Amino acid sequence: MSKHGDTALPGQWSPPYLLYLGNPADELAIKTARGVAYWRPEWCIGQYRHADCKPTLGLPDMGMAEAKERGANTMLIGTANAGGVMAPAIVADAIAALDAGLNVVAGLHQKLRENPDIVAAAKRNGRVLFDARDPAPGIPVGNGRPREGRRLLTVGTDCSVGKMYTTLALERAMRRRGLAADFRATGQTGIFVAGAGVPVDAVVADFISGAVEWISPARNDGGWDLIEGQGSLFHPSYAGVSLGLLHGAQPDALVLCHEPTRRHMRGLPGYPIPQLKACLEANLAAARLTNPAVQAVGVALNTSGVPAQEAAALCRRIGDELALPCQDPVTMGVEAIVDHLLACVAN
């Protein structure tokens, strides 16, 4: 990995992929597989699901042996759960994939390489294992010193509200305008999409801000590092990671991400979703520790749970309330947010 966290996808666990869904608890549990399928469809041959699995990516269902015959190189475990635990069914399916001649990659907190049966299957089949939530050695402690370059960080009212999608959409939109812009992955799905990054939620707490400084070092080409946010300052389980990202990113700009049908923090019914203005102000206040000039430049809504005819009106209302452009990156794009970002920089 280079100093900017850029690398080509490792040849040993490269696509084409069979995306593993197994039997997830809900749609959010397959966000890793869905993210890879959406942003890198050319890499995805099919999906593997248990018979009682309801969520789908719309890809062909196939077994491991069939996927191998069709050219798959790697099975990507695209499901997640609270705590990132490797359930017995995932272990059994990983072994079956290895025996079918596929490599196996995963982004769970519980590592493939820590399971002796999976390791034995990889060895006997000459296959490769890759754990995305395995930070590189030598990550420094953050120092907070100002560094050259421009940086944007996505933040959220909750987990799983579209921070990665928004960041990748901004990269795509800015590159289409001929701007230098680079997505910096901080989670397992982003790492699979980008081929590089650092899993900040697996980094020892004292080193989180340093990890973000490491993947987004000084740059003097006038371009932007677009840093994928994680968690939420208002989520009791994950606020620590969110704060470390804010400090390490030293962001010049923030985009607030929100899912408007959410009524409480994911997995915590006793904690309501914060008000957008309060959430944005808290993130700006925290970011000012390392960049006093930080500005909010937009709001990204995930309106997948809102009727189409209501989504545009909702974006207009929230945009008016916060005096910021508000768009759904998937259905509306992010051009207005990019326009506002560039106008803020020009001023």
Image: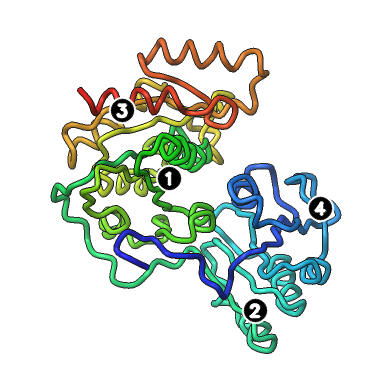
To which residue does mark 4 refer? 60
Q: Which quarter of the figure is the C terminus placed in?
A: top left
Closer to the camera: disc 4 or disc 1?
4
Label 2 belongs to which residue?
A: 118
Q: Residues within 10 Å of mark 4 (few under 14, many from 20)?
A: some
Alpha-carbon span between mark 3 and mark 2:
49 Å
Q: Amino acid at mark 1?
A: Gln
Q: Amino acid at mark 3?
A: Leu
Earlier in the chain: of badge 3 and badge 2, it is 2
In this rendering, the label closer to the viewer, 3 or 2:
3
Q: Nearer the viewer, residue 69 or 27?
A: 69
Element class at badge 1: loop
Residue on which disc 3 sits:
342
User: Which residue lies under the disc numbered 1?
Assistant: 230
Residue 164, image x and y in percent? Answer: 48, 43
Residue 153 percent location from the top left of the image:
35, 40
| Distance between mark 4 and mark 1 Cα atoms | 31 Å
Q: Of circles 4 and 2, which is in front?
A: 4
Q: In terms of sequence position, does the residue under pointer 1 or pointer 2 come before the other?
A: 2
Image point 45% across, 15% down: which residue? Answer: 318
Amino acid carrying label 4: it is Pro
As drawn, which residue projects farthest toward the front? 178
